[in-house]
Amino acid sequence: MPIILLILIPFTAGLISFFIKNDYFRRGLIIISSGIHIALTCSVWFKQPPPLLNGYFALDDTGILFLTITSVLFFGASLYGISYLSDEKRVIEKQSTYHRHASVEATFTGCFLLFFSTMTIVIVSQDLAVLWVAIEATTLASAPLIYFHRTKRSLEATWKYLLICSVGIALALLGIFFLAVANTADHGNMLLPRILEHAGNLNISWLKAAFLLFFVGYGTKMGLAPFHTWLPDAHSEAPSVVSALLSGALLNCAFLGILRSYQICYAAGLGSFCQEIFIFFGLLSVLFAAIFILGQTDYKRMLAYSSVEHMGIIALGIGLGGKAVFAALIGMLGHSLTKAGLFFVAGNILSYYRTKKISDIHGLISGKIRTSAILWIIGFLLITGTPPSGIFIGKFIILKEALLHGNYIAVLIFLAALSLVFIGMSRIVISMTQGVPNKNTDTATDWQNAFFRLCPSAIFFILVIVMGIYLPNWLTQIIETTAKKLGGF
């Protein structure tokens, strides 16, 4: 029962939102849906729900971990979003385009909730074909969110997102066909538990080809270089509350698609074959991100490239195996919380200054949005792996495992890239927070709802810091169980 409710509650609320004219009712629906969802998510930790529809939908330990991250992020985004939408309405009312905004906000709210529902379907899907459909649905549901501001740049970003991700998803579909051919002994059954039971009977050549297609296809949606080209534009042009979910939750859903296929390959004895691919593209992603962060002039694009970096770190951890798999999952959790919080803060800065240009923003720490400036600095320190934080723990273990395995070239590339990222991001953060505050700010910005614009980021950052000091047993156990399924320990 909880599984169907996890899917249907945001889905139904999303459909209803398209027809509600009152702004406050729509926003209330977001809060109610996210509150019920996170309550149901907490319940599955105490009692794992039974499979649904003959096992097509089920929650294993991996699914519970990913579901918890997604639900927590969406709840924080819901709190932030009601204030964000209120501020956007105030700005557009000044432009005498309120009726247009009312229609846009209804579309935004509906797609926002549908996006949440489709991500939930990705996580609970045990059939790889259903998972593929759900990942494609996340693309369709999130595209209107990127186009929220109705500008030429947001339209370009939306089309690039649709085009590139659709090509990637098409390759993943081809991977499903190849996997079906490899699984002829079970008549092409796509249920993950059934495939794992008969993994030893799969055709190895077809399985290798299938994994490559899954990796490139879902890796495009995950933001791994060089398939990441949609990501900087989409994250930059989307509203900050959407950027937080794209980076913190959607990339994880695509990563889950890769992990499901990797589970099959690992069970079939192709662990080393897949790990080499993870290591290569992981290091390539970290390098790409480091190079592009150095010359960034847009602070939201900087955060986008930081996501590319962290997806690379996660892939590297999976590729190294052993305890590095555990570290990759810890890093994924830390990245999701920290990056969502940073995008929320970026939204505060953008609402106040009405610009994404780094060169136009100075003196945040001594200006009127000092609290956001402090959170901006804390978020920067956390995302770059400054201890204590869960991200630091993840990076440190990955580095240690690489040294123990004798991957010295990987260690050098990894350390060099991390150093470049820190230099590039610190230059940007220092230039934005220090100096004389700008005088051409939007002093009329409504900060009466400042609590909801600041609290989610603060809570997320606190959680990441606590992860660097203490990991509760219940969280450690489920991460370890997931890591063992992926060749860890």
Image (cartoon, rainbow, N blue to C red):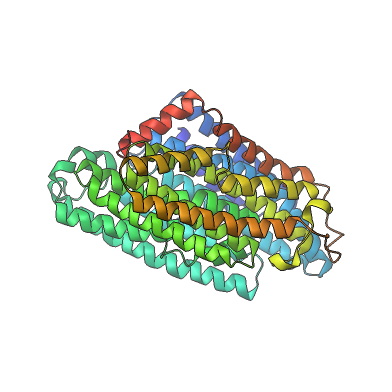
Question: Where does the image place residue 425, in percent across and percent down from the top left?
Answer: 61, 57
Check the picture and name the quadrant holding the N terminus: top left
Question: Where does the image place residue 129, in percent across and percent down from the top left?
Answer: 32, 52
Residue situated in front as seen by the camera: 436 or 118: 436
Q: Residue at x 68, y 63 (%)?
A: 103
Q: Is 339 drawn above or below residue 322 in the view shown?
A: below
Residue situated in front as seen by the camera: 29 or 229: 229
Question: Where does the image place residue 384, in percent across and percent down from the top left?
Answer: 56, 48
Residue situated in front as seen by the camera: 206 or 37: 206
Check the picture and name the quadrant holding the C terminus: top left
> Is residue 397 found left or right of 32 in the rendered image?
left
Question: Where does the image place residue 57, in percent across and percent down from the top left?
Answer: 37, 40
> Is residue 217 found left or right of 242 in the rendered image?
left
Q: Residue at x 31, y 36 (%)?
A: 485
In the picture as drawn, the residue positioned furthest to the bottom comes out as 152
Q: Residue at x 49, y 37 (%)?
A: 393
> Is residue 206 found left or right of 78 in the rendered image?
left
Image quarter for residue 143?
bottom right
